[in-house]
C-alpha cells in the first residue's frame, strides 16, 4: 500500500486505470511491466475506489482495504456526526479503520486515531492528509483496550468483521461493544457505531440514546450517544443527505384505514427506530394493518420521511388476478415490493406482464390482516 502512495506507485495506478477489459486481462497487461504483487494491489485499489464513489467525494484519492471499506462511514454520516462536536475539542477515533470519521472530525479539532490493523492506521493517516482538514490527524497502530485514554470526545467503532467474517453478537465485536462503557469512564462524550441489525437490547445495554442513520434510503448505522450531547430522545432517526431528524415521543399507534390514494413507505431508519407512529403523525397518514410499516394517505408525503407511490388499485392477492388487472390497465410490472408477505419478489415479477404502456410497481402486503396487492405508480 505504501508503494502505491509513492510517485512510482502513482504511475502504476495511472497505467492500470487506462487499461480496458476485465480484471484478469488488466492484470496480465500490468504484469508485463510490473511485479505481480504490485499489479494485483493496484487493480484491487482501483476496484475499491470505484466501489467507494457513491459514498466518498474523494474516492479517487483514497487508500482502502476491502474490510476497511465495508465498515467505513461515508462522507455524509461522518460529517453528520462531526457537526455535533464542539470546535477545538480533543478527539479520539478508536478503531478508526481507513479514517472515514477521522477526516471529518478533523474539521472540528485535532484527532488521535488508533487501529489494531497497521494497514488501516496507515490508510487513516494517508487519507486524512489528502483532505486538507483544518486540524491534524495523528494515526497509530494500537490496541485501544490498552491505551490510557484522554480527550473531550471519542468515536468508538469496533470491528464487526473480526477474522474476516461478519458477526451479529455485540459480544463478538472486536473489542466487544461493552468496551464503550470503559471509554466513557475516561472520555465524557462518546459515540458508538454499530450495525443497525443488532437487536435493541444490545444497543440499549449501553444506557445511551440510540440514533439510526440512513443515507439515500438505506439504514447504514446504529449510533449510540453516551454523555450530555447528541440527540435528546432515547430513540431517533436521522435521514441523510436531507439532514432530517425524527425523534421518538411515545406517539400512540396510527389510525387504521383501507388504502387511500397514496402508499407511503417510511424511510428505513424510521422503521428500524420504531418511529412509524411518529412519522404517521407528521405525514397525516394512517396504517392499513397495525403490524405493517406501510402507511396510506390521500396525499403524497412530500418529505424525506417517506417515499410515495400512487395507488391505482387495491385487490386481494392472487397471481392470476394481478396479471389480469395489469393487462386491463395496459401496464407492465417493473418491480415487486413486499412487506409482511410470504412471497419472493423476483419470482412473482417473472410471472407478471412485462409489456404495456405504463410502468407499475406491485406492492404485496397485508391490509386488515388479508394478503393484498396494490398496483402503484411512483409519486413525485
Image (cartoon, grey):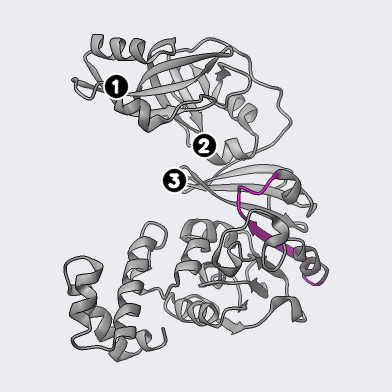
Looking at this view, is 76 or 196 the one in front? 196
Packing grade of label 2 (10 A; few <14, some 14-19, many >=20) is many
- Picture quarter containing residue 228? bottom right
Q: Residue at x 75, y 58 (%)?
A: 226
> x, y (%) of residue 187?
77, 70
**Disc 1: CA contacts within 10 A as few (<14), some (14-19) or many (>=20):** many
Neighbor class of circle 3 (other Cα within 10 Å; few <14, some 14-19, many 20+) is few
Identify residue for label 3. Answer: 216
Q: Is residue 193 magenta?
A: yes
Which residues lie in the magenta part?
186-199
Counting residues from the N terminus, which is met first, the one under dot 2 or under dot 3? 3
x, y (%) of residue 237? Answer: 60, 42
Name the residue tied to disc 2. 267
Residue positioned 77% across, 61% down in the render: 178
Q: Secondary structure at mark 3?
A: loop
Q: Secondary structure at mark 2?
A: loop
Mark 3 → mark 1, Cα distance in angstroms? 29 Å
Q: Look at the image and say whether residue 151 sits in the magenta stretch.
A: no
Above or below for 122 versus 212: below
Residue 161 falls in image quadrant? bottom right
Q: Quarter holding the N terminus? A: bottom left
On the picture, is 3 further left or further right than 148? left
How many numbered discs sit on the rendered protein? 3
Q: Nearer the viewer, mark 3 or mark 1?
A: 1
Tell me, yes or no, if residue 379 can be seen here: no
Q: Is residue 262 above or below residue 135?
A: above
Where the C terminus falls, by quadrant? top left
Residues tagged 2 and 3 counted as in contact (Cβ below 8 A): no
Q: Pinpoint residue 324: horizontal percent, then vertical percent.
A: 29, 10
Q: Which mark is residue 352?
A: 1
Amino acid at each position: 500500500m505504501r508503494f502505491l502512495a509513492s510517485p512510482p506507485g502513482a504511475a502504476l495506478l495511472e497505467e492500470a486505470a487506462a487499461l480496458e477489459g476485465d480484471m484478469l486481462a488488466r492484470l496480465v497487461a500490468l504484469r508485463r511491466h510490473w511485479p505481480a504483487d504490485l499489479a494485483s494491489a493496484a487493480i484491487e485499489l482501483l476496484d475499491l475506489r470505484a466501489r467507494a464513489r457513491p459514498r466518498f467525494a474523494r474516492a479517487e484519492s483514497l487508500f482502502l482495504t476491502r474490510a476497511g471499506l465495508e465498515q467505513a462511514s461515508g462522507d455524509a454520516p461522518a460529517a453528520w456526526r462531526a457537526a455535533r462536536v464542539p470546535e477545538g475539542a480533543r478527539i479520539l477515533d478508536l478503531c478508526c479503520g481507513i479514517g472515514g470519521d477521522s477526516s471529518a472530525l478533523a474539521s472540528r479539532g485535532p484527532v488521535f486515531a488508533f487501529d489494531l490493523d497497521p494497514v488501516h492506521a496507515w490508510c487513516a493517516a494517508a487519507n486524512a492528509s489528502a483532505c486538507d482538514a483544518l486540524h491534524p490527524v495523528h494515526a497509530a497502530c494500537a490496541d485501544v483496550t490498552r491505551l490510557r485514554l484522554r480527550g473531550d470526545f471519542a468515536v468508538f467503532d469496533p470491528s464487526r468483521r473480526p477474522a474476516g467474517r461478519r458477526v451479529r453478537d455485540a459480544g463478538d465485536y472486536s473489542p466487544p461493544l461493552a468496551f464503550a462503557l470503559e471509554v466513557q469512564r475516561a472520555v465524557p462524550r462518546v459515540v458508538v457505531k454499530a450495525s443497525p441489525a443488532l437487536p435493541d437490547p444490545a444497543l440499549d445495554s449501553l444506557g445511551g440514546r440510540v440514533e439510526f442513520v440512513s443515507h439515500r434510503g438505506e439504514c447504514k448505522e446504529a449510533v449510540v450517544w453516551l454523555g450530555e450531547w447528541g440527540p435528546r430522545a432515547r430513540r431517533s432517526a436521522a435521514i441523510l443527505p436531507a439532514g432530517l431528524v425524527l425523534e421518538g415521543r411515545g406517539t400512540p399507534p396510527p389510525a387504521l384505514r383501507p388504502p387511500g390514494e397514496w402508499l407511503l413507505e417510511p424511510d428505513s431508519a424510521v422503521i428500524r427506530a420504531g418511529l412509524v407512529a411518529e412519522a404517521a403523525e407528521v405525514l397525516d397518514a394512517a396504517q392499513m394493518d397495525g403490524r405493517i410499516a406501510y402507511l396510506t394517505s390521500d396525499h403524497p408525503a412530500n418529505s424525506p420521511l417517506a417515499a410515495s407511490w400512487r395507488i391505482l388499485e387495491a385487490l386481494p392477492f392472487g397471481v392470476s388476478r394481478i396479471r389480469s388487472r395489469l393487462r386491463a390497465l395496459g401496464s407492465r410490472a417493473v418491480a415487486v415490493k413486499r412487506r409482511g408477505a410470504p412471497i419472493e419478489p423476483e419470482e412473482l415479477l417473472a410471472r407478471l406482464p412485462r409489456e404495456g404502456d405504463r410502468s407499475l410497481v406491485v406492492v404485496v402486503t397485508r391490509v386488515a390482516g388479508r394478503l393484498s396487492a396494490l398496483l402503484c405508480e411512483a409519486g413525485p
